[in-house]
Amino acid sequence: MTSRDIISIVDLTREDILHLCSFGAQLYAEDRSGQRLARIDSLKGKVLASLFYEPSTRTRSSFETGFRELGGFDPIGFSGTEGTSVAKGETIRDTIMMMQANHADVIVMRHPVDGSLQWAADVASIPVISGGDGRNEHPTQALLDLLTLYQFNNKKLDGLRIGLGGDLKNGRTIRSLTLALSHFHDVQITWAAEDPLGMPHDLEQNLRQRDVHVERKTSVAEVLESCEFYYMTRPQLERMKDVSQREIHALLKRYRIDAEAIAGFTGRLLHPLPIDSRLSEITADVAFSPVQGFYAQAEFGVFMRKALLYEILHDVPHALFSGELPHELQSGNNRIYRAPSGKLVGEKFVGLIESGICLDHLRLGTAQQIADALELVNRGAGVIAATWGAKSFLKTSLDALTERDLKTIALISPEPTINIVRDRAVQDKYVYLLCENDTCITRVITEDVPPKFYYDGNLRCRYCRRPYEIRNQKVLEDERQRFLNELAKSVHNL
Amino acid sequence: MTSRDIISIVDLTREDILHLCSFGAQLYAEDRSGQRLARIDSLKGKVLASLFYEPSTRTRSSFETGFRELGGFDPIGFSGTEGTSVAKGETIRDTIMMMQANHADVIVMRHPVDGSLQWAADVASIPVISGGDGRNEHPTQALLDLLTLYQFNNKKLDGLRIGLGGDLKNGRTIRSLTLALSHFHDVQITWAAEDPLGMPHDLEQNLRQRDVHVERKTSVAEVLESCEFYYMTRPQLERMKDVSQREIHALLKRYRIDAEAIAGFTGRLLHPLPIDSRLSEITADVAFSPVQGFYAQAEFGVFMRKALLYEILHDVPHALFSGELPHELQSGNNRIYRAPSGKLVGEKFVGLIESGICLDHLRLGTAQQIADALELVNRGAGVIAATWGAKSFLKTSLDALTERDLKTIALISPEPTINIVRDRAVQDKYVYLLCENDTCITRVITEDVPPKFYYDGNLRCRYCRRPYEIRNQKVLEDERQRFLNELAKSVHNL
Amino acid sequence: MTSRDIISIVDLTREDILHLCSFGAQLYAEDRSGQRLARIDSLKGKVLASLFYEPSTRTRSSFETGFRELGGFDPIGFSGTEGTSVAKGETIRDTIMMMQANHADVIVMRHPVDGSLQWAADVASIPVISGGDGRNEHPTQALLDLLTLYQFNNKKLDGLRIGLGGDLKNGRTIRSLTLALSHFHDVQITWAAEDPLGMPHDLEQNLRQRDVHVERKTSVAEVLESCEFYYMTRPQLERMKDVSQREIHALLKRYRIDAEAIAGFTGRLLHPLPIDSRLSEITADVAFSPVQGFYAQAEFGVFMRKALLYEILHDVPHALFSGELPHELQSGNNRIYRAPSGKLVGEKFVGLIESGICLDHLRLGTAQQIADALELVNRGAGVIAATWGAKSFLKTSLDALTERDLKTIALISPEPTINIVRDRAVQDKYVYLLCENDTCITRVITEDVPPKFYYDGNLRCRYCRRPYEIRNQKVLEDERQRFLNELAKSVHNL
């Protein structure tokens, strides 16, 4: 795994995972035999950049503990962006470059936006490990959960029966853990939560396709009866907007794990921690019960992160910073080129412009809003914004559109058709695609991430990996095919 | 002192203190002879968890400096809870477990709630050193003050004449320092402050009982005439609520130490620092005067903490984390069991319930408020809340009360009597005690600290150590005696 | 450069700078040949106190990286003052003393007030390196910029043609960089910005006096044509108060560096970073262009700070803290003593006071305001505040004025004349000078910095180094001359 990025649990194979679990177990055994610092020379002189755009105690600490015990320097970076350059508007791109200029050898990063970690890994010439991106993934949490199951289950991950509780919908933990389990045979997952805490439909489907037995039971009691491990999670209240506090509390009461709930349960209760003592999704008495497994789980986090850091970095020489960005990140691959047509919408009403840009097939009634958002008048460009019948279009004498302009348009009117007009003729014509996941990094204008897609049977956003459906009816089948053919077949090809 | 917790200065003996002062003085001498890092191998590979729930520069830095010079790793933890798991509702209990999972060897902690440090020490299987709890204690500040006096006073702590200034009421420093001095012979303490800055009555009494000569003078000038050391403190404005800014400033003007005040004083002026430059309780010119002793005092803080860390941790092997909480913390010892009586209050009016709970002897008029606070209706339980004549009582069909329920009741109506009814008979009956110190950790519901008491002649709260008076008139003398007999005789027995 | 303070770039000679650049280049070469940690024993056991009163990622990180690679301990201190003793009102003076009590060997500090760094250096008995003070200077940024130019320009700093862009007015970077360049021959500086972003007049003049060719062009294009290096800076919006957002954006659009702007430019584009992605003063496409030099510049920051720390600290023994402040900081040298005159203003109207103080030549109409600000009535002093014709004066029975009192007066009425009256005679008479730079540390009352001046041909404030003009018309020429003669001739003499 030398110098590898860890962005999605799906990128790891069954063998990778088993190897990491077995190595993590070995590190645990070394620790218990008094050899906590036996590998103190492994990462001597190495630097960990710990970039937590969302504050974290737990994930960050366990990475730092692992790194410390392998002999690395104390970490650089930040936890929470207040008072950092990020608050002054620094992009992820520049922050990554800055960490490399400060001689980081590896980056651990958490960020609130989906796909931000893939982008960080693209920018960095050193390995990047995800500490969680938005609602997307948290792969090392999944790995530590697997190490915990591995340790509590006689070093086996096949045949597991696991129940899920709490908040299945809003946490990245459940997504990463269940996808990780899908590498193993004969796994049975049960759960009982209702909206707005239930398992997301796309995840359930994904798991079924990967041969995991997923079943929704009618009560927590029934789930507990059917499993050996019960994995409870904290309700991510900060991510729920449309649900009232009262409803949340009512749901919680139904799903709370207290002494009564676990009476008769002989398995292990896990939790990624922290438990929220205000909601008390697990009550204090349960913390004293023999089913409690979450404190040990926390320590397995240290061993798993230590294993990962060791595998990725040991015997790797110091990275020498080039001071340059990878050229392939300069532009996206999100334009479906089309044959310029003779005529443009509105031509007969307003005439063709001499030279400039014509936006076609805009969402009805958005032309003026787009003209305003692009500040065309302030930029000294001529503007004709029109809605006529079922068509909206925008003509401007502006020479060229920047990537930020294109995103601005696509955020208002998805899949706009862009016509570049020179000497009264359409010289270039394309449809501009932008990932439709609201919280995808490619939609954050100030981050300047050029949209990229790949095609693994589904068309997918390179960054958040969500599937994408081309909707623009004007795109011809052969234009579509040519576009898809030119895409990489996997996220791993830049 | 190997592996010992440092929670209260009172737990240390005269010999302990003299030993620490003598060792601190030795570390100072080593430093001045160019041997600052002579003990750099003593705590090699050890980890200090520095948990400052209230931010701190000074206490934290000096512990960290001491630890660094003994060769430990850089500290883990936090200073201020913003952006930590604590802000997500993590309990002290879980935070302590997390630090142990991250291989901490010792914990230094400051927390705004009284008794929190004793609780942390109870939870932790590694040594815990208090960096201050609420208005309670700050034992290592007292130790460094003693080292300062020891150094400035020819290595003697008997026979000291010390004046106290500034804010004697709201700081934990004065409490810990004066209690520490009470271990020594022939100590004379003078002070002149008025309400709301004067010495708390309970402290003054406590000191007198411990044979300290405490005397209130009428002016600062008189105090300065009678002492060799004047110990000034910062007014803890953030802890004063009912006093106007104007009054505080007026008081300060009277007690400010400026060039005029110290004219003629030939002793040493101490201060725990920081001096508040807005209030200027010590003026700038005094900082240049030969009586100034507080900068040296700050450095003695480093030597004292270094001495403590060395004594507690050197030659101690790494702690191996069990992943389990100590079982004796599961429940409190705060129930005075009583013989079930035949009849319950209100029986003749509302009849006895078949099965459930009856709360008796409630504070007049609180029955409905308690029913609401327990959310009995939401929990699907039957409720009869009644106030009749001088009696308030509450009957509910609820099966059992959790510890949080019991605290909720006791916070509204102290010393409630709980009757557990099964088959129309009272099966169990007890009075529930809860410490009456408003800022005691046992009263913070979300922390889930089971109330405990001990009896050293006074009945005392295990956590904040405040004396407790049983008020419930119904408790019979032999019930009270049996209860007291079963308690530990000292805080040191769990 | 052993044990030297780095406060202003002007204090360094051409030879100092060339030496540091050549040493920085050597450290870079060592790094690239795999010897990043070759000097890991140089600062073993040394402590860096990193005091960032304004938060910083970049400056702080690069100092810390340099220090780490030289083997020092991890830094102590803070970044942002929230939750530190500073928030509790601690002065710079006490914070510096505290860092020395914690065994710091060197201090790196950033502070929002001009002159604060010179004050810190005066207080400290260990070397102090400025990480920027207010709008004043940022000398190590200038040094790293010079190292960058040196590296990109074949190790020469004479004959440079450099263009400046963005915000020349509000950043300390431009001031320090251009002053640094003024040490070299045949330097040509061009710029094109308009108010409120243009080069400050005093700086332009200063540069001209130092033989730098400074020229304002009419457009960015013209500047780019005439230079080999274009140095862009971030608009310091947080420091602009009277300019609307709209105006700022309009200005930015004109000065933004995008693909079009740099078409044809073959030099190097530098920027101190961070680039503000919301304003996008440099657009994303430019970051991928071959003219981009700012990422390498960031790494040269590490090598320059490493060079500085090495030169200042290697082979220096640990500093032993004395616990005392330097006595020469106790008082200022800002009083022009005058011969007591027989009569005082207002004498014939209100009579001479028996004993007390008379403030003369006050700014018209300020007497009562001063009396209020000094809280004379609350202090129990008699007060006569009068404005009569063109004169304002204040008489009080107060015995003495503190330095804070004097500053309070001078902030309201500059250059007040103070008459100390004893037994109906003026015993002492002086004019009190206070630096007129609004953001000078001497004007911050709570910092208690005694005002000092020096005379290097101009009368200058010791702290912010701004020139000062004596305005009080009553001061006689020989009184003025005597005052100037007694001043130090350079800032370097205390």
Image (cartoon, coloured by chain):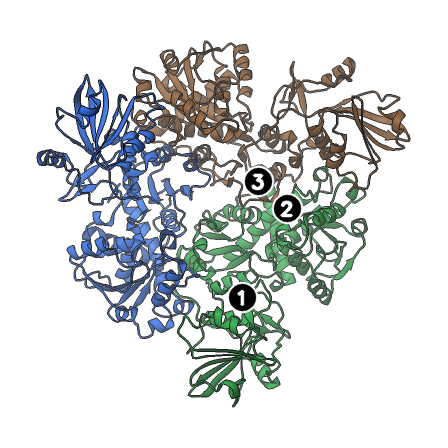
Chain colours: A brown, B blue, C green
Q: Chain of mark 3?
A: A
The residue carrying pointer 3 sits among few (fewer than 14), some (14 to 19) or many (20 or more) residues within 10 Å by Cα, namely many
CA distance separating discs 2 and 1: 31 Å
Q: Which residue is mark 2?
A: C273
Q: Are marks 3 and 1 in contact (CB under 8 Å)?
A: no
Earlier-in-chain disc, 2 versus 1: 2
Look at the image and tell me whether residue B313 can be seen. Answer: no
Nearest-to-viewer mark from 3 and 1: 1
CA distance separating discs 3 and 1: 38 Å
| SS at circle 1 | helix
In the rendering, which numbered label is found on residue A99?
3
Q: Quadrant of residue B469?
A: top left
| SS at circle 3 | helix
The residue carrying pointer 1 sits among few (fewer than 14), some (14 to 19) or many (20 or more) residues within 10 Å by Cα, namely many
Q: Which residue is mark 1?
A: C443
Look at the image and tell me whether residue C321 can be seen. Answer: yes
The residue under label 1 is which amino acid type?
Arg
